[in-house]
Image (cartoon, rainbow, N blue to C red):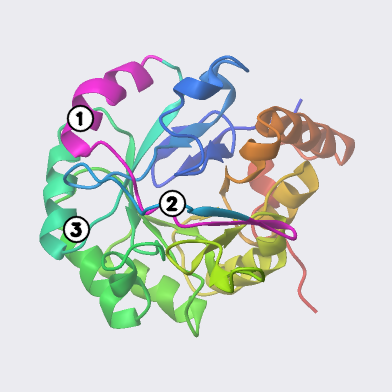
Amino acid sequence: MADMKVTVAGVDFSNPLIAASGTFGFGREYMEFYPLSTLGGISCKGITLHERAGNPPPRIAETPGGMLNAVGLQNPGVDYFIENDLPWLKTQGTTIIANIAGNTYEDYCAMAEKLSDTDVDMLELNISCPNVKEGGVQFGTSCTGVEEITKQVRAHCKKPLMVKLSPNVSDIGDIAAAAEQGGADAISMINTITGMRIDIRTRRPIIHNNTGGLSGPALLPVAVRMISQAYQRVKIPIVGMGGVSTWQDAVELMLAGSTALQIGTAFFSNPYAPVEILKGLEQYLDENNIASVTELTGKVQLW
């Protein structure tokens, strides 16, 4: 059987499948389906310096090939996470990533300092959430902004630092390079694409926030393209995400340049998605005489 272990920025994962932030909560709801150690890792629900209620409803809308969400980073705050969720998560036998979001440099740096003294394995810097009125996304859409926020947080962070990139930019390669220049140990990509649905009866947007982040299978070809572009620009590892719902999708994202993968929207329609993807991925590797899943990374042969 092929070796499924991967390493991202010095952090070991038992397999490349990570639950994406915002789709898995802090993992408790999924325990009834399988041990959380089935997953290579969990990127926890995005946390902010203080408790946040999120956006007013409705904040979810289905779309062809996916969904829109504008939850708005509802979470209990970093201190609650450290005291109540993290101790339990560390007993689950999987790698734990803390996803942090904020409105200011000071917010991000304060959280990085707090979490540096905990047992989290890695920090994921969320500068790409499109569903809040102000905050991370303002840092994530320009090269200067990405490099500066990464540099500032890097100075306060003792943990491996992964920067989550927005696809709502003109050149993803430049943005990835800016994160690397700022001191990121890894990048994760892509976050959601900003979209909108309208209720044709009321003529109002279905989502109260007007716009939301599009996720799900519709994102897959965009993610594959952007990961491939970033892989050609940076030397740091890429954790790929965007529309993964089958093992074939997982293979595509790895061939494009991903070292590991995050799975998100697929959980809502099929909680067993990672189990099925892992099984299919292992079978694919064995049938093709591939000794390690790491051999897939970046092996697309571009024309």
Label 2 or label 3, whichever lies nearer to me, is 2
Whether the residues at callouts 2 and 3 have beta carbons within 8 Å, the answer is no
Residue assigned mark 1:
80
Residue 285 drawn at (x, y percent): 79, 38
Whether the residues at callouts 3 and 1 have beta carbons within 8 Å, the answer is no
User: In the visual, does 146 lie left or right of 34?
Assistant: left
Label 2 or label 1, whichever lies nearer to me, is 2
User: In the visual, does 16 lie left or right of 25?
Assistant: right
The amino acid marked with disc number 1 is Tyr
Q: Secondary structure at mark 3?
A: helix
Question: Which of the pair 175/13 is nearer the observer?
Answer: 175
Instruction: Please say if 190 is above or below 262.
Output: below
Q: Secondary structure at mark 2?
A: loop
Residue 293 drawn at (x, y percent): 68, 41
Question: Which of the pair 151/69 is nearer the observer?
Answer: 69
Instruction: Please say if 193 is above or below 287.
Output: below
- The numbered mark, 2 or 1, whose residue comes first in the sequence reads 2
The amino acid marked with disc number 2 is Pro
Residue assigned mark 2:
57
User: From this viewpoint, which residue is outermost toward the bottom?
Assistant: 170
Residue at (77, 29) in percent of width and height? 279
Label annotation for residue 70: none
Mark 3 → mark 1, Cα distance in angstroms:
21 Å
Question: Which of the pair 187/6 is nearer the observer?
Answer: 187
- The numbered mark, 3 or 1, whose residue comes first in the sequence reads 1
- Is residue 71 magenta-colored? yes
Residue 59 drawn at (x, y percent): 48, 53
Residue assigned mark 3:
153
